[in-house]
Image: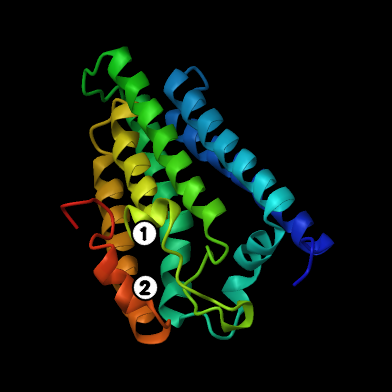
Amino acid sequence: MADKVPTFNRKMIVFRFIFTLVLMGVVLFLSAGTINWWEGWVYMVISLAMLLGSRLLLIIKFPEVAAERMEAGQKEDTKAWDKVLVPLVAIYLPMAVWVVAGLEKRFGVRTGLPIWAQILAFAAAVAGSMFSNWAMFHNKFFSSHVRIQKDRGHAVVKDGPYAIVRHPGYAGGFVHFLATPLAFNSVWTWIPIVILITAYVIRIIKEEATLVAELPGYEAYTEEVKYRLVPGVW
């Protein structure tokens, strides 16, 4: 296994970060029609700080995971259905959330939440992202796409956050998604958020079917850790 991420991959990671920064800022504030929007700035700063911090740590401490996440979309054994779902859940639906939130700012649509409740929602979004990052740092097979990584000795991870729920990365992401409309003091962003969560639920169901069928030991793991996302619920 390589002891560092190839130079090309490092450049691509930097490019993707800059692209995300520009895209998020343009979509949010162009939709809002103003830069005088504290929720937009806080959301962007928090999102990009979490993204930058996690990716830098991944490159430095877990370069093999960074390489896998960069290259998985081009692997032959990546599931074809996931190549369709990943752009939807990673790009298009988050962009829809930003557009709707910005338009609500432009037209003055508010739920009337107090600022302290919005701040708590931002804190919940950060906590959810940190939980997802814990899963990513703990699982050396934490890929960006669904595939059985036979080339990397893919095995079931059962400890750390995976002793709590089977999909802690998604669980933390769902906390972030559910906190987002509250953080924005938003009414209509619930629509793309619900669609986004639905798409992820479909992905989880299909991913689990793949893991049970193709990853040795995973079916037994589902008997040890009963719940996918929320203990006692699902």
Q: Earlier in the sequence, mark 2 or mark 1?
A: 1
Q: Residue at x 32, y 52 (%)?
A: 164
Front position in the image: 74 or 98:
74
Res 143 → quadrant: bottom right
Q: Would you say residue 57 is visible in this rendering?
A: yes
Image position of 58 with respect to 51: above or below: below
* Left-right relation of 122 to 138: left
- The residue where tag 1 is placed is 167
Expressed as whole percent of the image width and height from the top left, the position of residue 119 reads 37, 19
* Left-right relation of 74 to 82: right
Q: Would you say residue 14 is visible in this rendering?
A: no
Image position of 77 with respect to 171: above or below: below
Q: Residue at x 49, y 47 (%)?
A: 134
The amino acid on which the numbered mark 2 sits, given as a three-letter code, is Glu
Res 226 → quadrant: bottom left
Quadrant location of the N terminus in the rendered image: bottom right
Expressed as whole percent of the image width and height from the top left, the position of residue 227 reads 24, 59
Residue furthest to the right in view is 7
Front position in the image: 182 or 71:
71
- The residue where tag 2 is placed is 207
Q: Residue at x 47, y 39 (%)?
A: 130
Quadrant location of the C terminus in the rendered image: bottom left
Residue contact at pointers 2 and 1, CB within 8 angstroms:
yes
Expressed as whole percent of the image width and height from the top left, the position of residue 57 reads 67, 45
> For the residue carrying disc 2, how many other residues have a C-alpha within 10 Å: few (<14), some (14-19), or many (20+)?
some
Q: Secondary structure at mark 2?
A: helix
Q: Secondary structure at mark 1?
A: loop
The amino acid on which the numbered mark 1 sits, given as a three-letter code, is His
> For the residue carrying disc 1, how many other residues have a C-alpha within 10 Å: few (<14), some (14-19), or many (20+)?
some
* Left-right relation of 66 to 119: right
Expressed as whole percent of the image width and height from the top left, the position of residue 109 reads 26, 25
Image position of 214 with respect to 55: above or below: below
